[in-house]
Image: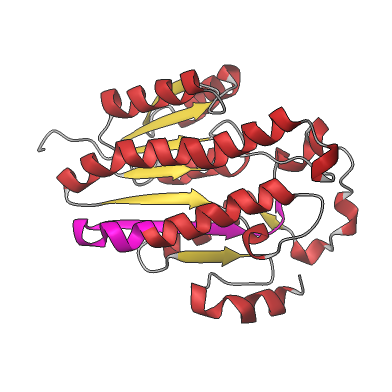
Amino acid sequence: MSDHKITAMVTGASAGLGAQYCRQLAERCEVIIAVARRGERLAELARELHGQVEVHAVVADLTTIEGVARAMEALRQQGPVDYLVNNAGFSTAGEFADQVIDSQYDMVSLHINATLALCRTAIPFMAELGGGYIINVASIAAFLPGGGMAVYGASKAFLNHFSTALQAEVAASGIKVQSLCPGHTRTEFHDTAALSGFDKSTVPNELWMEADAVVTASLQALATEQVVVVGERSRPVCRKGLQQQLDAMEL
């Protein structure tokens, strides 16, 4: 495909890690397909990156079938993609039995179903290109089950397991799959009504990272590590060093 433009799709692109992925991938790509619910934020991002990269904004709610279909169609029309970043996510806080079940279904739909759909759409095209990169944004919570975020942690554990298994399946096609497992990161993630009861001051400052540093660590390790755990007092590590890393982070 001699006329192919290096292209990335990033979900949850309107803020936080997603916006940072768009900014940093602008240095590697010619086209970015930015997917999020908030069209005005995507328009701001497109204006910011104007002159650096061609941005296609896709306004879609990936908790819905319609939203996932819209993203899949954008991937087909604007792709094939060289980079797929499944970053969109959210959490609630509180005991599972006290949660509205629809919010938990939405979390599973977003973290798991949307990721599966976009990976399944992207992989054949990546294989045809001769390779590509998939980043599934999981969480340190994938390894630390605890009360209050049961579905969130379980869905992130799924992403971690899925990413590792998927890498084994697509390696021969030249595709790299990364499970990114950040610790506490300063984004808008904790500022939603669903997490209004979470007191960020209870987490020591040294355990927080900035979004740009997390994305930098992810991209630096993309070609070499399957599972990347990042935290303020950590460095990117592969799966075999995970326990030592968690101990060092004192989580």
The residue located at (20%, 61%) in the rendering is 172
Residue 99 visible at all: yes
> Where in the figure is residue 18, as x and y percent of width and height?
54, 40
Q: Is residue 75 above or below residue 176?
A: above
Q: From the viewer's perspective, is 98 left or right of 208?
A: right
Q: Nearer the viewer, residue 79 or 112?
A: 112
The residue located at (76%, 70%) in the rendering is 251
Q: Which residues lie in the magenta part?
A: 166-186
Q: Is residue 242 above or below residue 161?
A: below
Q: Is residue 169 magenta?
A: yes
Q: Nearer the viewer, residue 11 or 216?
A: 11
The N terminus is located in which quarter? top left
Image colouring: secondary structure
Residue 59 visible at all: no
- Give the quarter of the image for residue 105: top right
- Give the quarter of the image for residue 202: bottom right
> Where in the figure is residue 180, as x and y percent of width and height?
52, 57
Q: From the viewer's perspective, is 162 left or right of 167?
A: right
Q: Residue furthest left?
A: 2
> Where in the figure is residue 218, as x and y percent of width and height?
49, 58
Numbered marks: total: 0
Q: Nearer the viewer, residue 43 or 147?
A: 147
Q: Is residue 171 above or below residue 6?
A: below
The residue located at (58%, 30%) in the rendering is 14
The residue located at (67%, 39%) in the rendering is 90
Q: Residue furthest front?
A: 97
Q: From the viewer's perspective, is 113 left or right of 139?
A: left
Q: From the viewer's perspective, is 147 left or right of 9?
A: right
Q: Is residue 59 magenta?
A: no
> Where in the figure is residue 158, as x and y percent of width and height?
54, 53
Q: Nearer the viewer, residue 26 or 158?
A: 158
